[in-house]
């Protein structure tokens, strides 16, 4: 089954498409053109002056930023139903990050004027898009606070909890992260060295919190993971 704009499968409730009304969603998905990208292909290059917007129909992309020193930081992972690249057209600034496909993906590519027209036709969708942007800003702020004040094991545990909240899927013995990530990519997410992340994962495995496979992770005890993250228990 193709999980795209013609699929009967529901869009993730936390995604932008999942929050839109059926009429809003149908209008947005009628715009632009459908394109497919293979694993590792670049959708957006950091610094380029383009303004088109991507609606993710299948798969996942990683959003990365490269500093002046050449260090790459993995800012976020976006999935089916999410919007990518909407900021450049809003403020006419160069692209802030590079966006790369994780595996094969399908998208709809919209020229920014079409996206603007969609927002003009659907004032209710403006609130949803603004809420999506606000959530991205909150996540980025949380990461800045973590990076400046927490050690690597705590940063890693909090990053895993964020990924679970956004992309997790139930499996027989816990919750899978839901996206394929290598340990170097996890290291980029928490702005740490690979050996430090490997050591932190080993500690989580020792306590039965997580199982690590090839680019896959299953969390068996989210309550204990919250303890490692130095966060209060879930309500």
Image (cartoon, grey):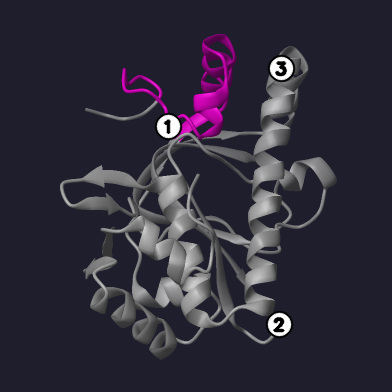
> Given this view, does label 1 or label 2 mark the residue nearer the observer?
1
> Seen from this angle, which residue lies furthest top?
23
Whichever of labels 3 and 2 marks the residue nearer the N terminus, that label is 2
Q: Residues within 10 Å of mark 1 (few under 14, many from 20)?
A: some
- Residue 217: x and y, percent? 28, 62
Q: Residue at 62% of width from left, 39% of height from top?
A: 53
Whichever of labels 1 and 2 marks the residue nearer the N terminus, that label is 1
Whether 8 is drawn above or below 224: the answer is above
Viewer-closest of 102 and 155? 155
Whichever of labels 3 and 1 marks the residue nearer the N terminus, that label is 1
Whether 78 is drawn above or below 208: the answer is above
Q: Residue at 32% of width from left, 21% of height from top?
A: 7
Mark-to-mark CA distance, 3 and 2: 39 Å
Residue 80's tag is none
Reading the image, the residue beneath label 1 is: 12
* Residue 86 is one of the magenta-drawn residues: no
Q: In this image, 171 relative to 164: left or right?
A: left
Q: In this image, 118 relative to 165: left or right?
A: right
Residue 68's tag is 2
Q: Residue at 52% of width from left, 22% of height from top?
A: 29
Q: Which residues, given as a range, are shown in magenta?
A: 5-34
Question: Can I make out residue 112 in this image?
Answer: yes
* Residue 13 is one of the magenta-drawn residues: yes
> Seen from this angle, which residue lies furthest bottom?
195
Mark-to-mark CA distance, 3 and 1: 19 Å
Reading the image, the residue beneath label 3 is: 124
């Amino acid at each position: 089954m193709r999980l795209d704009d013609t699929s009967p499968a529901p869009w993730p409730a936390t995604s932008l498409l999942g929050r839109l009304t059926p009429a809003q969603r149908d209008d947005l998905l009628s715009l632009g053109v459908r394109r497919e990208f293979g694993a590792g292909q670049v959708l957006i290059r950091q610094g380029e002056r383009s303004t088109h917007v991507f609606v993710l129909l299948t798969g996942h992309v990683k959003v990365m930023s490269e500093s002046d020193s050449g260090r790459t930081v993995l800012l976020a992972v976006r999935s089916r139903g999410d919007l990518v690249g909407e900021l450049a057209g809003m403020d006419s600034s160069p692209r802030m990050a590079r966006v790369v496909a994780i595996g094969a993906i399908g998208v709809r590519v919209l020229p920014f004027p079409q996206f603007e027209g969609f927002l003009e036709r659907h004032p209710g969708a403006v609130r949803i898009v603004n809420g999506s942007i606000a959530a991205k800003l909150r996540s980025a702020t949380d990461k800045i606070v973590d990076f400046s004040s927490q050690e690597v094991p705590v940063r890693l545990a909090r990053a895993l909890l964020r990924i679970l909240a956004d992309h997790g899927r139930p499996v027989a013995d816990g919750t899978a992260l839901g996206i394929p990530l290598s340990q170097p990519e996890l290291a980029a997410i928490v702005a740490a060295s690979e050996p430090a992340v490997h050591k932190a994962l080993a500690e989580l495995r020792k306590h039965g919190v997580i199982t690590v496979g090839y680019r896959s992770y299953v969390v068996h005890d989210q309550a204990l993971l919250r303890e490692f993250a130095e966060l209060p228990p879930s309500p």
